[in-house]
Image: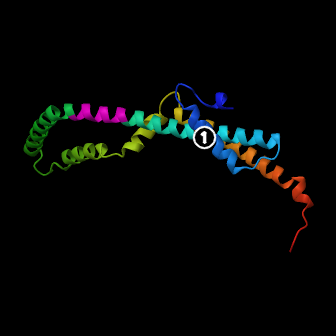
Amino acid sequence: MTAETVIDALEDAEDYAAFEMTITADFDAQSSVERELVLRLASLLWRLRRATAIESGLFEIQARQLLQFRQRRQAQKKPQETVEALCRSAISLEAAAQFPEHNNADVEGSASMTVSEGDTDGVTCAFLRLSNLPSYPLDRLSRYEATLWRQACQILFSLQFLERRRPWERMRPHIR
């Protein structure tokens, strides 16, 4: 099953073989059917690990893009802040001259809103960006994971059922 499960260019076949041995050691397969189920379970659990790595990779890609975007915005912000400060002071002076009864709270309020937008959590931004991509990678990954988990649960159920039906277990007298 190693050749079907491991992506040679991305994963180490020896790592998978060790993982598979660990899983098979947890189950004492007594028949060829049980052995095949255990090998299939190991393959599914390996693919679930891969799905987790894919999710982490998607978020890392988005985080890098977000960081680059913030760095570019920060570099552009210096000259822009100077222009905005001049505009705000000009607007404040003009507003004070035209409407002395109003203070410039609206101007200050709009400036504080732009500051709070920059404080958004990076993981949340990455999630939103991934969610809004037209290819819906998180939805696809979620469906893939759900399919793998469903199959793994079916195999675990089958193994549990086979465990109950072992003939040598039925022959033992129950001691109370």
Point 13% across, 52% down: residue: 101
| Image label count | 1
Quarter of the image that includes the C terminus? bottom right
- Kindly tell me whether residue 145 is visible in this rendering: no
Q: Residues within 10 Å of mark 1 (few under 14, many from 20)?
A: few
Q: Position of residue 172 (x, y in %)?
A: 90, 63
- Frontmost residue, 67 versus 29: 29
Position of 163 relative to 107 (above/below) = below
Horizontal side, residue 32 vs residue 88: left or right = right
- Frontmost residue, 70 versus 160: 160
Q: Position of residue 155 (x, y in %)?
A: 75, 44
Q: How is the structure coloured here?
A: rainbow
Horizontal side, residue 159 vs residue 76: left or right = right
Q: Say if the magenta span includes residue 131.
A: no
Q: Position of residue 78 (x, y in %)?
A: 15, 35
Point 65% across, 42% down: residue: 21
Horizontal side, residue 132 vs residue 41: left or right = left
Point 24% across, 44% down: residue: 110
- Kindly tell me whether residue 13 is visible in this rendering: yes
Give the main secondary structure, helix, strand or loop, of the magenta stretch. helix
Residue range (magenta): 64-74
Quarter of the image that includes the N terminus? top right
Position of 131 relative to 23 (above/below) = above
* SS for callout 1: helix
Q: Amino acid at mark 1?
A: Ala
Q: Position of residue 14 (x, y in %)?
A: 57, 34
Which residue is under mark 1? 18
